[in-house]
Image (cartoon, rainbow, N blue to C red):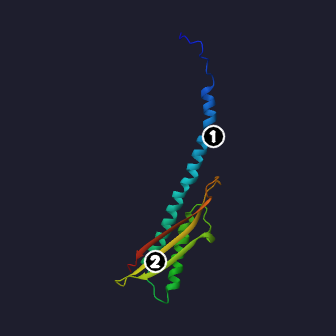
Amino acid sequence: MAMRGKNTAPRRGTAATEFAILIPLLMLIALACCDFGRIADARMVLTNAARTGAELGASRGFTAFTYDAWEALVRDAVLDEMQHFPGFQEPDLDVSVTTTIGPDDVVQVEVGVGHPFRTLISWPTLPNETGLEEQIHFRQFR
């Protein structure tokens, strides 16, 4: 049997007390990681929507008479892809479709997509909403 010194008192419940103090902090950190980790998923969906719209626009030709229908087709492709965006609201979606003619007379299609990202929890001193934007350029190949 080990001998204890005179001044050494038994430390019963120390681990339980430390656990009770630290578990709320660990839960808060885990919740924050999950909440802010969602932004990576939202960014991928936004990038994919812009890429889908630009690819569709690059694969279909247009004339001065069919430009409006072509642009509506590109916007619809972006809108369809954005259905996978967490918390998607169509009025918040900002889609810009522009075309330029390069020096080699090839049309460049640029699709820009923007949508706000909102956290699930309103964190103190941190913004509850941030804007995500993506622009994709494609050369028309048809």
Q: Measure the C-alpha gap from mark 1 to mark 2.
A: 50 Å
In the rendered image, residue 21, in percent from the top left (x then y), is placed at 63, 35
In the rendered image, residue 126, in percent from the top left (x then y), is placed at 61, 55
Identify the residue shown where x is 55% and y is 63%.
Answer: 84
Nearer-the-camera pick, 21 or 53? 21
Task: Answer few, some or many: residues within 10 Å of disc 1's Cα (few below 14, many 20 plus, some between 14 and 19).
Answer: few
Position of the C terminus by quadrant: bottom left
Kind of residue at badge 2: Gly
Residue 105 higher or lower than 137, as above or below: below
Which callout, 1 or 2, points to the residue nearer the camera? 1
Identify the residue shown where x is 46% and y is 88%.
Answer: 63
Residue 48 higher or lower than 95, as above or below: above
Res 109 → quadrant: bottom left
Identify the residue shown where x is 50% and y is 85%.
Answer: 67
Q: Which residue is mark 1?
A: 24
As helix, strand or loop, the secondary structure at mark 1 comes to: helix
In the rendered image, residue 70, in percent from the top left (x then y), is placed at 50, 82
Residue 86 higher or lower than 92, as above or below: above
Nearer-the-camera pick, 2 or 98? 2
In the rendered image, residue 73, in percent from the top left (x then y), is placed at 52, 78
As helix, strand or loop, the secondary structure at mark 2 comes to: helix
Task: Say whether residue 139 is left or right of residue 88.
Answer: left
Kind of residue at badge 1: Pro
Task: Answer few, some or many: residues within 10 Å of disc 2's Cα (few below 14, many 20 plus, some between 14 and 19).
Answer: many
Residue 66 higher or lower than 54, as above or below: below
Q: Which residue is mark 2?
A: 57
Identify the residue shown where x is 63% and y is 40%.
Answer: 24
How many numbered discs, if any?
2
